[in-house]
Image (cartoon, rainbow, N blue to C red):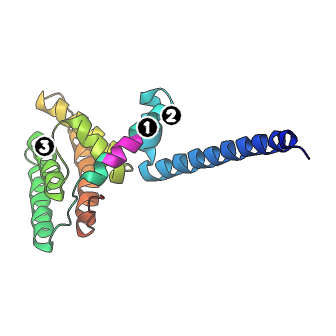
Amino acid sequence: MSTGALLAIIIPVAVVLVVLAAGVVLVRRRRHLRERFGPEYERTVEDAGGRLKAERDLSAREKRHDALEIRPLPGSVRDRYTRDWENVQGEFVDRPEDAVQDADILVTSLMRERGYPTEGLEQRLKDLSVEHGRTLEHYRAAHDVNQLSMKHEATTEQLRGAMVHYRALFDELLSNGGQARHART
């Protein structure tokens, strides 16, 4: 068999193998991102206007998150946050708007204590989405009600819902307090 005939067989086979390998990598990457980000994956796809752009964004979030030094919480600090949350919940009966605002402050404080940057809501949402994508919608909903509350436009039922939403993220952040994540090099 001539060299030309051999190349005519080998080159197309190599191209097909490369295309198949690239397809497998993309499918695995997509599956990884869907599993890691949960509902946040579809939300990001919708916001970005396409899967590839969204997947680049989600991968960038992972890289930023991996550079953060998310710390475990000592037991005494977890206990303090638990007591603080109980106080905020107790405040709800007499001052629901203040309780929701205090819940927001407490959740933000807990994020900071764990090592999450807390500047800007959008960046907080992106940073939290990497490990807390399944409870992130709770945080968004609570934050929206908190904004209404600051203008005295939230109903008592909305305020109650906000407390439940804040509690979902609070519990997750607190329970992950014993699991350290270290920056990758």
Q: Which mark is residue 110?
A: none
Magenta segment: 58-63
Which residue, given by chain and number where applicable, does mark 1 sit on? 56
Q: Residue at x 46, y 30 (%)?
A: 46
Q: Residue at x 89, y 43 (%)?
A: 2
Which quadrant of the figure has residue 173?
A: bottom left
Is residue 158 visible in the rendered structure shown here? Answer: no
Dot in front, 3 or 2: 2
Instruction: Give whichever of discs 3 and 1 has the lower sequence position.
Output: 1
Indicate the secondary structure of the residue bearing disc 1.
helix
Farthest-out residue, right: 1
Residue type at mark 2? Leu
In the displayed structure, 53 sits above or below 9; it is above
Which residue, given by chain and number where applicable, does mark 2 sit on? 52
Q: Which mark is residue 96?
A: 3
CA neighbours of label 1 inside 10 A, class few (<14), some (14 to 19), many (20+): few
